[in-house]
Amino acid sequence: MAYTLGEIAQYLNAEVVGDENISIEGLATLSQASSGQLSFLANMAYKDQLQHTQASAVIVHPKQASECQCAALILDNPYLGYARVSQLFNTLPKANHQIHPSAVISPTAKVGEHVSIAANVVIEDHAVIGGGAMIGSGSVVGVNARIGSNTRLHHNVSVYHDVVVGDDCIIHSGAVIGSDGFGFANEKGQWVKICQIGGVVVGNQVEIGANTTIDRGAMSDTLIGDGVKLDNQIQIAHNVEIGAHTAMAAGCMIAGSTKIGSCCTLAGGVGVAGHLQLADGTHVTAMTLVTKSISDPGSYSSGTAMSSTSEWRKSAARFRQLDEMAKRIKLIEKSLKE
């Protein structure tokens, strides 16, 4: 794969500074790039590398254009430009539009045109596979499940019965969509299973990371909105609703029946308790535990900053004394008033 800088500029609608005929054969960071590669500057922490990079060209903001020692593509959002140009150099294998002879497809399933189905795939009764979909080796699509057009399931994805996945989605290896929610009733110390009779509905253009689990609803469906991006190893419990274009980093845990608004971001390791609501535009920083609903958009955090172990132990001891200290302060305030 090779493009001239001018071709890439046209693709990105970017201004070119320098030779438009430079051949670009790949992408690399500022520090690692060599001749024939395109880089970008989006984080000013790497600004000093701009003057020393060996890249043939760099995507930069107009403010940094004069500092670039090589050819440049000028964009107001260099990181977005990098994201788009990365699609030109994507190494992901293309669809072959073939069905492997080892695939097991129910005669009652419906498979659209130009579908690619790899080795050892199982498509169960009455499942529907949309046109242009790609089903990776070892994946299972359950009874009555629906996979939208141009959606890609990587290797070993499990889509349970009655799950609906929209168009143009990407589901990475090991993801499980539609497993049972954690529902049990207690009878004299023993747990009685509550059958999870809802499903999961995944919108269009959703990406679900490796080993992420989305549980089916207890009675109604678990809902994942259009454009949602879920990183690896996330747990979405039963009847959770996630609004459109919300993104979650790895390790997030969302308890049952919580509703997360649209255009939210949850950083790595965030936990959200059950039956809460998070407003549209809520942003939660890493390792935060959300224990009550958030009605006002903005940034939220919890926990304490890292410190040395000896300092942390002292602070932990003081935390246990806070209630007693609060009572003493009230008594002091009362006596002062008197």
Image (spheres, helix red, strand yellow):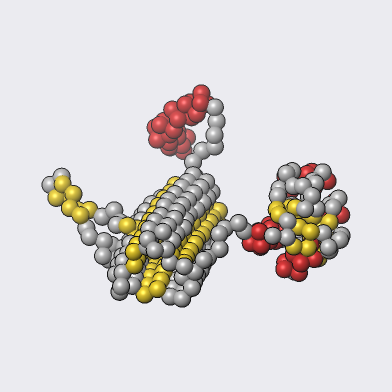
Q: Residue at x 49, y 69 (%)?
A: 97
Q: Is residue 9 above or below residue 212?
A: below
Outermost residue, top side: 310
Q: 218 left or right of 16?
A: left
Pick the front one: 185 or 53: 53
Image position, residue 227 (x, y; %): 52, 66
Residue shown at the point (46%, 76%) measured from the top left: 113
- Tell me which corner region of the image, top left, top right, bottom left or bottom right, holds residue 293: bottom left
Q: Is residue 87 visible?
A: yes
- Decide if residue 281 is in sight here: no
- In this orientation, which residue lies closer to the viewer: 188 or 124? 124
Give the residue at x 44% y 61%.
118
- How many dots with numbers? 0
Q: Quadrant of residue 91?
A: bottom right
Q: Is residue 324 above or below residue 248?
A: above
In percent of width and height, residue 217 lies at: 31, 63
Looking at the rendering, in which quadrant would you find the C terminus? top left
Left or right? Give the position of 239 relative to 54.
left
**How far across and how far down the image is residue 291, in percent?**
41, 50
Quadrant containing the N terminus in the rendered view: bottom right
> Residue 102, position in %: x, y?
37, 61
Residue lying at 79% horizontally and 50% vertically, measured from the top left: 35
Of all residues shown, which one is farthest toward the left?
188
* 238, above or below 52, in the image: below
